[in-house]
Amino acid sequence: MAIMTLERTVRLRFGHLSRANATHTNLSAVRSDGPVLWIAGDETATLERLVADDPAAPAEYAEDASFRLADFVALPGEDADEEADIEGVARDGHFLWAVGSHSLRRKQIKARHEGDKALRRLGRVVGQDNRQILVRLPVADVDGLPTPVRSLDADGTTLVPAALAPRDNLRALLADDEHLALFLPIPGKDNGLDIEGIAVQGERVYLGLRGPVLRGWAFVLELRPYVDPDSPERLRLRDFPDGRAYRKHVLDLDGLGVRDLCPAGEDLLVLAGPTMDLDGPVRIYRWHGAMTVEQPSVVRDEVITREVELTYGEGDDHAEGLGVIGPPESKQALIVYDSPAVARFHGDDIVLADVVSLP
């Protein structure tokens, strides 16, 4: 395994709306898409698009455009702008995908809280409906840039934005799972269910779980979404041969959970970090042949290799998003951070991301 080799930093220049929503300080997902970069933060229900100054060798992404998910699909929450805790973004074919964490949240003890009040807060667990989303948006070329649209005619079919149907809600599907059901009532940062990362290739959709981690094994769920023929704005899940609407893979990540996923040809790059509220370690692994598996997998030994050991801060610089710059076989990965260190901020609109070398 290689120690992180920093090739260069890249400037991410955010607009007023993203800064007002603190997206630039809570980056949770990233995906490179030709001339643009798709970014998500975990405090909003939007996707951000930044444009490269040079798609071949970007030094800066700017011209921030924000896209509200509620402008494309019906979100489950009563407040369309309530945070969706978007933890994964993927781009494949005609579509841009986004997934919420599906997690519960425990109230934090803040500096002003003492005694019983502090303990009461720590005992409160809440959920947010908008976190329970899997969304697929058609993307068209608009003025030379990939752009989410409400309708796209492609391959003889009209494509429209779609979200996973309530009847296939992932938390409901996992309610009787022998490994994961017991962790559904537990907050994500307490080793409960917490989706952080999505990778899509063809009909395959992979969701990485930050938690739970069981006896050191991390989970990746595999789905086969399809469009409901009676409701094109709804996605359903096709059953696997065992009758379940999902397939489980367990990965030996040395006790870490999944923080992000990124396709790399037939392989899958896995950004891994602690499940609990800890600073590190943080690593990039390669799951060899992930995009060709045809059965539930126990991913260990030579099938999964440590690629890069990433640096991390003390209370900051938590790597949350991983994207490959360039073609699938590229050896450069872009890393974005939640709670960026002070040194990453240049002025009030620029945050630095890292480009690191892959073996």
Image (cartoon, helix red, strand yellow):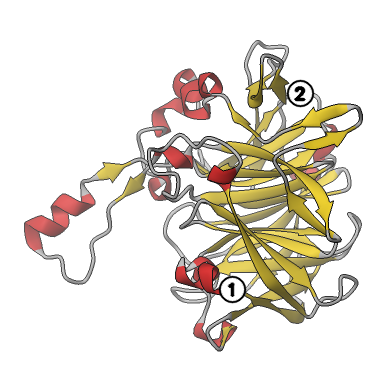
Image position of 158 with respect to 18: above or below: above
Residue occupying the point 91% across, 57% down: 329
Residue occupying the point 81% across, 48% down: 140
Image position of 311 with respect to 113: above or below: below
Which residue reaches farthest left? Answer: 116
Under circle 2, the secondary element is loop
Closer to us: mark 1 or mark 2?
1
Under circle 1, the secondary element is loop
Residue occupying the point 81% across, 77% down: 53
Residue occupying the point 76% across, 23% down: 295
Q: Residues within 10 Å of mark 1 (few under 14, many from 20)?
A: some
**Which labelled disc corresponds to residue 299?**
none
Q: In the image, 189: left or right of 46?
A: left
Q: Quadrant of the N terminus?
A: bottom right
Residue at image mark 1: 15
The percent position of residue 192, horizontal first and vertical second, equals 42, 40
> What type is the residue that disc 1 sits on?
Gly
The percent position of residue 139, horizontal first and vertical second, equals 77, 46
Cβ–Cβ under 8 Å for marks 1 and 2: no
Q: Earlier in the sequence, mark 1 or mark 2?
A: 1
Residue at image mark 2: 295
Instruction: Please tell me which residue lies in front, 26 or 316.
Output: 26
Asked if one can make out residue 178 in the rendered structure from this viewpoint, the answer is: no
